[in-house]
Image (spheres, rainbow, N blue to C red):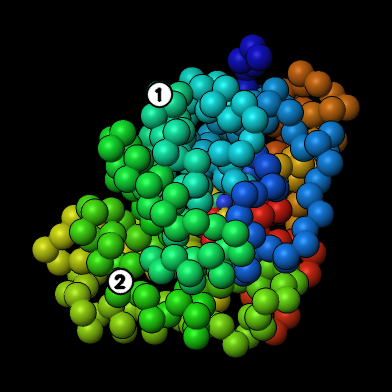
Amino acid sequence: MEATALTQPTSLIDPFGRSVDYLRLSVTDRCNLRCTYCMAEEMTFLPKQQILSLEELRDAATAFVELGIRKIRLTGGEPLIRRDILKLVSSLSALPGLDELTMTTNGLLLPTMAQPLKDAGISRLNISVDSLKAERFKQLTRVGDLSQVLEGIHAANAVGFGKIKLNAVILAGFNDDEVIDLARFAVDNGMDISFIEEMPLGEISSHKRVNTQITSAQIHEQLAAQFTMVDSAETTGGPSRYMRVANSDSKVGFISPMSNNFCESCNRVRMTAEGRLLLCLGNQDSLDLREILRSHPGDAELLKHKIVQAIGNKPERHHFDPEQVDIVRFMNMTGG
Ligand code: SAM
Ligand code: SF4
């Protein structure tokens, strides 16, 4: 696609003065796991024609980058099961103006894909692992083999990505007894780790979300009893805060969408695999970019104009209530 002259502002500023420079791009709603907190056991996935093609994803990403997006994280569903993911990575990593292309993955396919991903231009990875106990991991993911994920983590480490970050969703009464072990695993392997509060996205049958809530403050309390935790000013924007583990290279992130609202510094938007621009994880507001991409193919200016308009509707903050599940949107649809 040819670069076109910008007629819109070069940066995306929302009505609350927040500069949006970070896009999470979901490339598929499908997954090779079925994590209980993320999906129902039986899921209906989107028909292929509703998913953006490689070219549409690239055109949308190009428009965002021309408007001032500096970092893109590829996610899903599981991004590594998308056919042609390496082609997409290669074309996005070449976009002028994009500072960083990263990915969040469950790690299962990394043993074979870590090196090609790095070669194609992914600079850093977040790898999700919620338990280091094989049986529990299988229960939580319904089908997963922990040894494959661990192999994937080690493969990614060996390839020499920037600092790897592990993601762990903590569920009270299920894996909250592994907070220390997960943190130690990260420290021992020179990685960072973020602990995530479970969000009520999608109706699930495995557990009542209200019973599994645990706050970042409770997780921090556990960690502080074992490690010396040092405040850190580092931030990536959005609902997370970081601390350092003393005498280590590791940072611990606390992602607290439920207990603590850091929306005032939110710098991100999301695009779903079907091309819906979500302005906030906890709100329904969205813009159908697929419709624009398909009805006006190649019209980059129109696309950018619509994106700028949509940023003007970015909500000030989200309002999650674990008792009130958003029944429509599962996290695999939303793009984590
Ligand atoms: N499949 C990839 C993975 O698991 O890393 C990428 C997509 S996944 C939706 C992205 C992140 O969202 C994962 O770290 C996952 O644990 C997290 N996640 C999924 N459902 C969630 C929920 N209901 N609340 C909080 N985090 C959730
Ligand atoms: Fe798949 Fe990631 Fe959701 Fe687990 S959290 S089911 S790995 S998309």
Question: Label 1 vs label 2: CA separation?
Answer: 32 Å
Q: Look at mark 2 in the image and give the residue it sits on.
A: 181
Question: Is 21 on the left or on the right of 47, as rendered?
Answer: left
- Residue located at (56% from left, 68% from top): 140
Say what secondary structure mark 2 lies in.
Answer: helix
Foreground pick, 269 / 51: 51
Q: Residue at x 19, y 55 (%)?
A: 249
The quarter of the picture where residue 47 lies is: top right
**Mark 1 — residue?**
119
In the image, which is nearer the foreground, mark 1 or mark 2? 2
Farthest top residue in view: 2
Q: Amino acid at mark 1?
A: Asp
Task: Estimate the x, y position of residue 199 in percent, counting from the top left.
Answer: 60, 71
**From the image, which quarter does the C terminus lie in?**
bottom right
> Residue sitting at 73 percent across and 66 percent down?
40
Q: Helix or strand or loop: what does disc 1 sit on?
A: helix
Instruction: Describe residue 162's horizontal placement relative to residue 74 as left or right.
Output: left
